[in-house]
Image (cartoon, grey):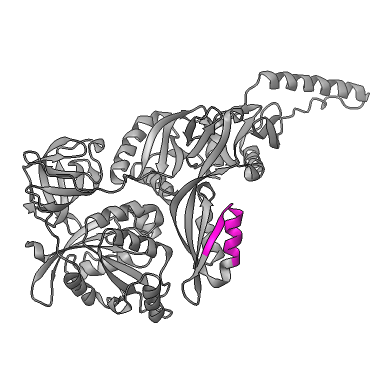
Amino acid sequence: MKTELIRNFCIIAHIDHGKTTLSDRLLFRTGTISQREMQDQLLDSMDLERERGITIKAHPVTMMYTAKDGQTYELNLIDTPGHVDFTYEVSRSLSACEGALLIIDASQGVEAQTVANLHLAMRKNLEIIPVINKIDLPHANVEQAKVQLEEILAIPAESAILASAKEGIGIEEILEAIVTRIPAPKSTGVGSLQALTFDSFFDTFKGVVNHVRIFNGTLKAGMQALLLHSGKTVEIKEVGSFNPKPYVREALELGETGYFTANIKSPLDVKMGDTLTETRHPAPALAGFQEIHPMVFSGIYPINTADYEHLKTNLAKLQLNDPAFVYQSESSVALGFGFRCGFLGLLHLEIVQERLRREYNMDIIATYPSVIYRVKMTNGELKTIDNPVFLPEPTLIDFIEEPTVKAFIICPNENIGDMLALVTEKRGSPDHTETLDPRRVMMTCRLPLNEILIDFHDRIKSLTHGYGSMDYEHDDYQQSDMVKLDMLVNGEPVDAFSCIVHRSKAEYRGRALAAKLRDVIPQQQFQVAIQAAIGGKIVARETVRAYRKDVTAKCYGGDITRKRKLLEKQKEGKKRMKSIGTVHIPQEAFIEVLKA
């Protein structure tokens, strides 16, 4: 295919604004899939994506389209996720394109993630084609969406295309706009092959399959190629494209998108954003993507300790498919051997756990999520702590710094008071508020990252009846009064339940954990004390009552001192048992508490 007839583009939008439905429509209109193969969410191949109605992975697909000028164009589309936790997938897809379709829901208008994804695309100098989708809905407000385009995103309203992906309205105009407005790929001017690997997955028969975009030269089967970052020389076994299923091609030319397989057997040999070039005449490396740093950490342990090696292999395969996920091995007294895993956010953590359970049939348990703290020691040393177990003694700590985020919350006008109360409850401070349109405002706030980990997003949705949305970017560290909360069972600390919390919330959290543990720890022959402690100070206590045998049953009538004597004897026995007895906490108890 001639380079001037190739167009590479992706679709970006806020979650649930109709990206996947639009890509299904484009595939059907260009004849890439037939009526028989047509199904909703065609590019969302994971069960999880279909169930939740979200895109998790970016999906490339090649379409052929005959335009009004009579020419047949090759359109390479990459459908991208919309949720804030998968921004890394979006940034990788943008690196392989020259243009982007920006989808805006006519009934909801511009949302937080729309703004974030647009900024990502503008940084890469992509041509933006705005599409106002869902115009067929009874409560669609097209004029409002056009005003927001101009005022919030600074894009001329007349350049927007009105469409309804569900009804098939405006699909022709979108395809023509892709052909006329998005520029053809240009060569980088280097003498040999230059290709960017932007995604990969593991195939049991072919090994590692890499998604690639050619920036210069030609990629064919049988070539000797070099991966610049890893320094590994490979022989190309097969090249091809997706429509949406993979099909083999003779070669991938300049500007085309597709895949290649080589003699790469281990997921660890491939780095996302690596440059593929010829072995004899290596070209300079292309600018990859920024190194991603995980923000949320959680321990993942196999429920059956014999599955440890199996879990290790599956995590390596998963990391190949999702390079934003990182892991390293660790062990815990209570849970045995497992891994400390890093994620971009809480949805990311949830999705990874769910994929391990479904795709790899793993029985796993995850510990309470935490973030990276910076601890300044009294001797001047600076430590980074992502696991409460490694927090030094309070006497050795000068101060602790916690990571903060800059959050952008879009909500209806009537919910501003509720939002401010929520931000204050989460130890945040509002910076400023902007009016987006007569109905909605955008609040910019600074919040500690560990406060938005668990239920912040859900609380926004429930307070605004589903109309609120949120996006965040990582800010700086701030000094905070953080303490380590230990849970003691029968006077022994249990490391799996330890966490680092703000002093003002430690007592509440300690009480909640103690109450939960009281319900799940089985009764013993002696009374068991469950305590929450900060350093040497106990802040909460619950008691698991002992089994009692009715020793006075055979004493009917007679003197009360006989009964008292028997009860005292029993008490002594319990006391002696408590001093030598240990409390065995079953695995189910850990799972119950960590689920809660």
> In the figure, is residue 345 to the left or right of 282?
right
Tell me the residue at 9%/61% (across/down): 3
Count the marks: 0
Above or below residue 274? Residue 311 is above
Where is residue 519? Give x, y as percent.
64, 40
Rendered image quadrant of residue 282: top left
Where is residue 151? Give x, y as percent.
40, 74
Q: Quadrant of the N terminus?
A: bottom left
Please tell me whether residue 204 belongs to the stretch shown in magenta: no
Task: Please tell me which residue lies in front, 563 or 490.
Answer: 490
> In the figure, is residue 347 to the left or right of 100?
right
Tell me the residue at 21%/39% (across/down): 229
| Residue furthest right as drawn | 559
Where is residue 364? Give x, y as percent.
43, 38
Q: Is residue 247 visible?
A: no
Rendered image quadrant of residue 232: top left
Tell me the residue at 24%/55% (across/down): 95
Q: Quadrant of the C terminus?
A: top right
Where is residue 108? Give x, y as percent.
43, 72
Q: Is residue 122 visible?
A: yes
Above or below residue 23? Residue 283 is above
> In the figure, is residue 185 to the left or right of 325?
left
Rendered image quadrant of residue 593: top right
Q: Which span is picked out in magenta?
A: 417-432
Task: Please tell me which residue lies in front, 380 or 487.
Answer: 380
Above or below residue 564? Residue 57 is below
